[in-house]
Image (spheres, rainbow, N blue to C red):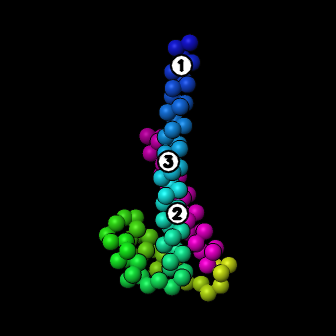
Amino acid sequence: MKKLLLAATLLAAMSAQANQDQEICDSYANLASIIMEQRQSGVSMREMMGRADGREPHESMVVEVYGMPQYSTPDFKNRAINEYADRWYLNCIRRQRVNNAN
């Protein structure tokens, strides 16, 4: 019985950690999406760096997206936004798994 209780407690803790990790990664993906959307809308890099105000990963994202093309058609803009957000989400999930394994 004690082993079952311990296993249930560990499972609950792991589930809570997974939810917290996903929320963090969702936040990164949302931020990446907003920054790329601004890039695709023609907002200047100077303005975006001012908005980032020295915060990370904001500044790193701004620098990265302004090294990427700005598209003219809505389909290409949406694809760029979604792919950039997905890349940040994927990298975050991978980091979280490595950190949780250690």
Q: Which residues are magenta?
A: 77-102
- In space, the residues marked 3 and 2 are separated at their CA atoms by 14 Å
Residue closest to the far right: 75
Give the mark toward the camera: 3 or 2: 2
At numbered mark 1, what does the secondary structure look like: helix, strand or loop?
helix
Q: Residues within 10 Å of mark 3 (few under 14, many from 20)?
A: some
Going from N to C along the chain, the mark reached first, 3 or 1, is 1
As measured in the structure, the alpha-carbon distance from the residue carrying label 3 to the one carrying label 1 is: 24 Å
Q: Would you say the residues marked 1 and 2 are in contact, meaning their CB atoms lie under 8 Å apart?
A: no
Is residue 29 rendered magenta in the image? no
State the residue in front, 64 or 23: 23
First along the sequence among labels 1 and 2: 1
Is 83 on the left-hand or right-hand side of 55?
right
Against 1, residue 10 (above or below) is below
Q: Nearer the viewer, residue 31 or 92?
A: 31
Hey, what amino acid is under mark 1? Leu
At x 35% / y 77%, what residue is drawn?
A: 50
Could you tell me the amino acid type at mark 2?
Asn
Q: Are marks 3 and 1 in contact (CB under 8 Å)?
A: no
Disc 3 secondary structure class: helix
In the orientation shown, which residue stands out farthest toward the top?
1
**Residue occupied by mark 3:** 21
Residue placed under numbered mark 1 in the picture: 5
Percent of width and height locating residue 44: 44, 85
Indicate the quadrant where residue 64 lies: bottom left
Label number found at residue 30: 2
Looking at the picture, which amino acid does disc 3 mark? Asp
